[in-house]
Amino acid sequence: MSGVMMPGPMFAVTLAKSYRSQFAGALIAIGHGLVEVPLILLIYFGFTSFLDNEAVKLAVSIAGGIVLLYLGVNMLRLRTAVIESREELPLNSVVAGITTSIFNPYFLLWWATVGAALITRATDFGRTGIALLIPVHWLCDLVWLSLVAFLVYRTGRLWGRRVHSILFAGSALLLIGFGLWFVCSAMVS
């Protein structure tokens, strides 16, 4: 649950997309799983050393930071139009789950460290351990993001436009902040 409940780019997009759909969290979790399951299998088969490569970390941090900046600026720019039902955010929820996973360097770092340790422990139980780790971990993502989306969607009618605008702006600024952090931390290291 340490990686699942951590506020980050995927959480910010879930908040913003849930304004329109109570199923946004589940769809984002599906997109996230499309990235995460192959990554788990790659780590299981020895891919961890690739993720430890400094050039790979630098490239993912810079590219990821730029993509998150783009998403955040777009979300900030479109927030009024989205609230007034004239437009939708540019990515559908599944693509948002894929994008915020692939371009989040700390997602990859988490899997190269904590996740790799989980995989190692799961392999103590053979292939059954890995076969159980994958769905259990993904179900944690699914349940958490679905709960967030459901709560935002169901309580959204209780909020005024100002609260919606603040939610969108906060989510956008969170994405922009993570984008800047990823790019700056890549430049410093």
Image: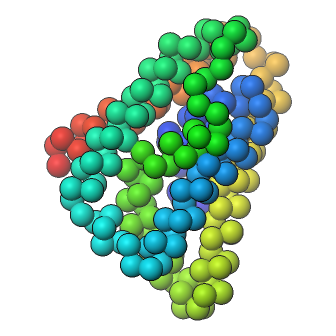
Q: Quadrant of residue 114?
A: bottom left
Residue 179 appearing in the image: no
In the rendered structure, the answer to whether residue 68 lies left or right of residue 83 reads left
**Residue 98: x percent and y percent?**
55, 46
Q: Is residue 158 visible?
A: yes
- The quadrant holding residue 107 is bottom left
Q: Position of residue 96 (x, y in %)?
A: 57, 38
* Scheme of colours in the image: rainbow
Which of the two residues, 76 or 127, is positioned nearer the viewer here?
A: 127
Q: Split into 4 quadrants, where in the image is the N terminus?
A: bottom right
In-front residue for pair 134/31: 31
Vertical relation: 125 (above or below) 146? below
Closer to the camera, 154 or 22?
22
| Picture layout, residue 85 above or below residue 146 | above
Which percent across, then down, holds residue 159? 75, 17
Question: Could you tell me which residue is drawn at 59 percent across and 40 percent down?
Answer: 95
Which residue is pictured at 65% across the width and 55% down the height?
Answer: 141
Q: Is residue 97 above or below residue 55?
A: above
Q: Is residue 144 left or right of residue 78?
A: right
Query: Image point 83% across, 30% down: which residue?
Result: 154
Q: Residue placed at 54% from the left, 56% from the top? A: 35
Total count of labels: 0
